[in-house]
């Protein structure tokens, strides 16, 4: 992929968009061949916007209006295997219905890009944000990029294609952002003009595909004990290689956007004694709370996880060299294990790196429960006690939850 | 019929020999025959099932066309995505060759778990042919009841025992359900009448839009019949009018075969081990019920075809 001129960043356009509209705008600029469409709150408006682009000739994509999310991802698997650039978007229960095909997309090494607007999973029914839906797919083989705001939803969506389609990777990429909090909130963001985006993403040229007249292929054979294990190992290796590709793509993206991305964002952590780890929109709330606490002279910092899969465990540990206590914030629950999944993963890397500081799990925001800077400030107060005593105390804690 | 048997012989095999379907299995005949009915490039999808697991055992592959297998219930959605991709890439000049699209699934992957995906693809009108090789039960997993299983048949999940006498419901009339999707072509065929099937596939592949063919393809393991009796058993299903041969073109029904002398259903079911309990005198009412239902459905079909 040829580099893109730095001057392109001057063409940035500042607009106010919801996260859904920002992702739809990214999809329009990328101009995929096929989009499978099925409604579910809070994703629905993303594909409304995209269908509006289609109806008005603003994008060349053909829509496949399927009858379920299972068929949405199935059709996208078919389209991608056929040699097309294919997308879809979903949330929560729709994502759960796709489950079988989520694994198939990764197992077939198809560079599909899917937006998942995070929402709680039934039951009881709740349409608001938490991360239960995508956290469940953390072992599915997909690359998962979390977004803090509409800007990141837009930027991650564009970058996702380059990551997925890279010949060292060839894995599906899931771009997530928080339901309603990001999907339905108007924010100011900088768009990039169409041409630099199209040049950045480039033409999709698959190597092996069903519609290649020169090479009949079988996609998805039965793979028995003599071979499946090796093929799954290849998925592991591709995932590991994606780590470097994600950073390379981010560097190139910076040239057309002026915005830099890594696997994580470490915010005022160099000397931080208390570090909070978070992902999604809450990372913004935590950074705000860090600023307030810093003004009061407290050594606190935040780590935002952008690349959740592959998990940047070493980067996270490296980013908190002075930590005396770590709070890991999860918007989902690891039932039967205690706390949330991100907590266990961070703590696992800490163990491997010989980092012996108390770590506490904070589960928050389930089903769209609010989290404010005041809640984070209170969490920092609790963590100050943990740091001073060196004792974890109650390991699994909850924020803004009635007793 | 445009393509003669002789011409078919000269066309390359699209399903290579050496696959691992059981001896006497009728389903590979469905695949082989269907794929020879066009000389255009063909891309296919197959549902999880006997034909998938016996033809694609990695690193071997019996298919000489590009095929995709994704899961049990989504062959129709998958091929619809392939077809949509083709339309787009063909229009853009990225795939210049003309392609046809075909999907295969058993009755489980069509009548039951695959019905929603199939219904969606048919309603959207993709240019594709979906062929159900109907052997009247989940045979790949070891003979379990499906909604295609006939009334009274013994399967491992609806058994004939001391208090139960096999399946308690009549089969779902899937061909009629597909015809009600208002697609340009729907047909019912039987593996014993290969010329009828050939003509139907050829027509289905020539028609622009979604087409569906339901072909009876007996499984001797599940039906408990001698290995060599698959075609004969299919013939008896047609001669008894349990499985009429017909087609629906643009909503117009046509019955393709009317037996000179309609045989009683017992001629079809009694040679089959899965119906052996039906021979017991106390089960005579069950046989009568199967006969009654068969007659009713046959009369309904004749009425739809304007033959009554």
Image (tube, rainbow, N blue to C red):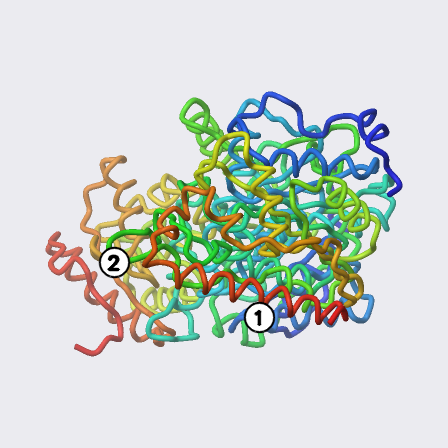
Chain letter for mark 1, please. Answer: A
Chain under callout 2: B
Q: Residue at x 57, y 48 (%)?
A: B134
Q: Are the residues under badges 2 and 1 in a single subunit?
A: no
Which of A381 and B90 lies nearest the eye of the viewer? B90
Q: Is residue A241 above or below residue B83?
A: above
- Residue corresponding to mark 1: A39
What residue is shown at x 81% (from left), y 39% (from top)? Answer: B38
Q: Quadrant of residue A310?
A: top left
Tell me residue A55's x, y (percent). 78, 70
**Mark 2 touching mark 1, by CB under 8 A?**
no
Residue found 52% across the figure and 42% down from its top: B48
- Residue B171 can be seen, yes or no: yes
Regarding residue A10, the answer to whether it shows in the image is no
Label 2, secondary structure: give it.
Answer: loop
User: In the image, is residue B176 above or below residue A375?
Assistant: above
Of the 4 image quadrants, the one containing the C terminus of chain A is bottom left
**At 80% across and 51% down in the image, what residue appears?**
B87
Judged left or right of residue B227, residue A205 is right
In this figure, which residue is indicated by the disc labeled 2?
B163
- Local SS, label 1: loop
């Amino acid at each position: 992929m040829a580099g893109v001129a730095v001057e392109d960043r001057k063409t940035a356009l500042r607009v106010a968009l919801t996260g859904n509209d920002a992702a739809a705008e990214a999809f329009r600029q990328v101009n995929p061949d096929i989009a499978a469409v099925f409604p579910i709150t809070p994703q629905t408006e993303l594909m409304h916007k995209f269908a509006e682009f289609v109806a008005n000739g603003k994008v060349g994509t053909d829509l496949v209006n399927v009858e379920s999310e299972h068929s949405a991802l199935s059709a996208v698997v078919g389209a991608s295997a056929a040699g097309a650039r294919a997308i879809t978007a979903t949330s929560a229960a729709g994502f759960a219905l796709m489950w079988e095909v989520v694994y198939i997309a990764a197992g077939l090494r198809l560079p599909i890009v899917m937006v998942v607007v995070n929402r709680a999973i039934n039951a009881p029914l709740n349409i608001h944000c938490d991360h239960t839906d995508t956290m469940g797919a953390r072992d599915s083989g997909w690359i998962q990029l979390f977004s803090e705001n509409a800007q990141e939803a837009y930027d991650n969506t564009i970058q996702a294609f380059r990551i997925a389609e890279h010949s060292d990777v060839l894995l599906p990429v899931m771009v997530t952002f928080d339901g309603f909090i990001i999907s339905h909130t108007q924010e100011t963001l900088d768009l990039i003009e169409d041409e630099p985006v199209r040049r950045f993403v480039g033409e999709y040229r698959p190597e092996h595909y069903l519609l290649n007249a020169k090479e009949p292929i079988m996609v998805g054979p039965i793979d028995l004990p003599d071979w499946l294990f090796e093929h799954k190992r290849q998925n592991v290796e591709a995932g590991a290689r994606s780590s470097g590709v994600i950073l390379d793509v981010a560097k190139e993206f910076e040239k057309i956007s002026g915005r830099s991305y890594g696997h994580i964002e470490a915010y005022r952590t160099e000397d931080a004694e208390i570090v909070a780890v978070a992902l999604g929109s809450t990372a913004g709330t935590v950074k705000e709370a860090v600023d307030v606490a810093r003004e009061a002279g407290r050594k606190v910092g935040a780590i935002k996880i952008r690349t959740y899969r592959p998990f940047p465990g070493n980067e996270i540990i490296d980013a908190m060299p002075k930590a005396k206590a770590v709070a890991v914030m999860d918007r989902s629950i690891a039932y039967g294990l205690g706390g949330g999944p991100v907590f266990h993963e961070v703590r696992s890397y800490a163990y491997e790196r010989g980092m012996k500081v108390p770590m506490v799990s904070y589960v928050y925001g389930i089903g769209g429960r609010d989290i404010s800077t005041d809640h984070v400030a209170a969490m920092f107060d609790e963590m100050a006690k943990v740091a001073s005593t060196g004792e974890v105390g109650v390991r699994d804690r909850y924020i803004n939850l009635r007793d | 019929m445009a393509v003669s048997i002789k011409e078919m012989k000269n066309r390359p095999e699209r399903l290579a020999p050496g696959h691992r379907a059981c001896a006497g299995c009728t389903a590979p005949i469905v695949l082989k025959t269907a794929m020879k009915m066009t000389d255009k490039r063909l891309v296919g999808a197959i549902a999880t099932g006997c034909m998938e697991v016996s033809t694609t055992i990695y690193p071997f592959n019996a298919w000489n066309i590009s095929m995709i297998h994704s899961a049990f219930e989504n062959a129709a959605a998958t091929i619809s995505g392939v077809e949509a991709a083709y339309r787009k890439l063909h229009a853009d000049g990225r795939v210049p060759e003309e392609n046809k699209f075909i999907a295969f699934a058993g009755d489980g992957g069509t009548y039951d778990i695959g019905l929603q995906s199939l219904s969606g693809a048919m309603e959207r009108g993709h240019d594709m042919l979906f062929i159900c090789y109907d052997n009247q039960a989940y045979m790949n997993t070891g003979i379990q009841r499906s909604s295609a299983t006939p009334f009274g048949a013994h399967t491992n999940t609806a058994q004939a025992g001391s208090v139960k006498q096999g399946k308690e419901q009549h089969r779902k009339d899937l061909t009629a359900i597909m015809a009600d999707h208002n697609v340009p072509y729907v047909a019912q065929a039987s593996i014993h009448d290969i010329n009828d099937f050939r003509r139907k596939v050829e027509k289905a592949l020539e028609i622009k839009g979604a087409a569906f063919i339901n072909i009876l393809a007996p499984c001797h393991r599940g039906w408990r019949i001698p290995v060599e009796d698959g075609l004969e058993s299919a013939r008896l299903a047609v001669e008894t009018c349990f499985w009429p041969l017909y087609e629906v073109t643009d909503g117009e029904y046509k019955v393709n075969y009317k037996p000179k002398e309609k045989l009683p259903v017992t001629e079809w079911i009694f040679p089959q081990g899965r119906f052996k309990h039906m021979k017991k005198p106390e089960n005579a009412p069950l046989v009568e019920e199967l006969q009654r239902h068969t007659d009713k459905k046959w009369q309904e079909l004749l009425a739809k075809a304007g033959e009554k």
